[in-house]
Amino acid sequence: MKRLKFSLRTQKEIKLLDAERILAVATATSATALASKKRSLIIRSGGWISSRAVNGFVKRAKQNDNNNKDEKKNNNQDNKNNKNNGNNDTGKGKTVDAQITFYDGQSLKNSACYGINGIRSYDANENDMIAAMHMNELELCYECIEIRNPENNNSIIVKVIDKCAGCPPNANNVDLTPGAFQQMADPNAGRVNVEWRPLDKCPDKGRWPIFEELDKHN
């Protein structure tokens, strides 16, 4: 009889050790692994841990897992956004609200940015992707700007090569060739609201003169 009592006590102690081991491991176990351990456990006081208590522990562990996953996901998204921002760096400046008009005929001849300082003269044609702007001197010569029409989202890149005598000094307006204007809006409109931004440099290819650098170094 005493031997049987010893055997039962030993089994209880073994179950107690198993319960403590499972609870200790549970703190470092993912919710998925912990869910497989949903069973009654013996604790030191001799009572049982209910399935509800185990479910509560599993729920908390699962919430922690989800929080960790969300944090990792957010970090990955931030890294992706930073990478995309770096890849999308176009070197464009601040957007300016303005209006576009167009000029043609004899006004296109003898562009102000050419025929000076040893640079050959240039007569623009009506399909060139060039622009004239108000300039005090020639400070905007050879700069490229990107123009966008908010109404239809059409956009073009033009090179500034001429002064615009009729452009208001503080309006940032751009006078285009008929061909360039037509890509932005109906020429019958005459004057259209747009926005434009300066580029760090002109694209390698475009319908505009490029010989000024060569002439400067000759």
Image (tube, rainbow, N blue to C red):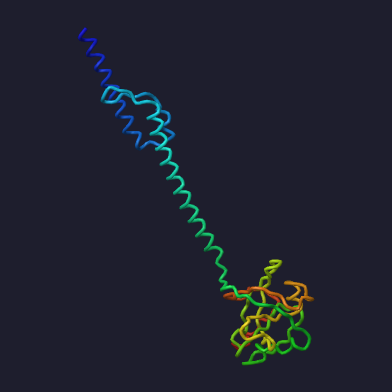
| Residue 188, x across and y down, in percent | 79, 76
The one of 79 and 8 positioned closer to us in this rendering: 8
Quarter of the image for the N terminus: give it. Answer: top left
Displayed quadrant of residue 120: bottom right
Residue 42 vs 128, above or below: the answer is above
Measuring from the top left, give residue 57's x and y in whole percent: 38, 34
Q: Quadrant of residue 118?
A: bottom right
Which residue is located at x 64 percent, y 73 percent?
195
User: Residue at horizontal 53%, vertical 62%?
Assistant: 85
- Residue 218 is left or right of residue 129, and the answer is left
Q: Is residue 86 left or right of residue 44?
A: right
Determine the residue positioned at 40% across, 37% down.
60
The residue depicted at 65 percent of the width and 89 percent of the height is: 119
Front one among 142 and 44 = 44
Q: Tally the numbered discs.
A: 0
Tell which of 90 and 50 is nearer to you. Answer: 50
Determine which quarter of the picture holds residue 41: top left
Residue reaching furthest to the left: 2
| Image coordinates for residue 45, horizontal then vertical, percent | 26, 24
Looking at the image, the residue that sits furthest to the top is 1
Q: Position of residue 22 (x, y in %)?
A: 33, 29
Query: For this view, does 79 lie left or right of residue 6?
Result: right
From what the image shows, is residue 199 above or below residue 120?
Answer: above
- Which image quarter holds the C terminus? bottom right
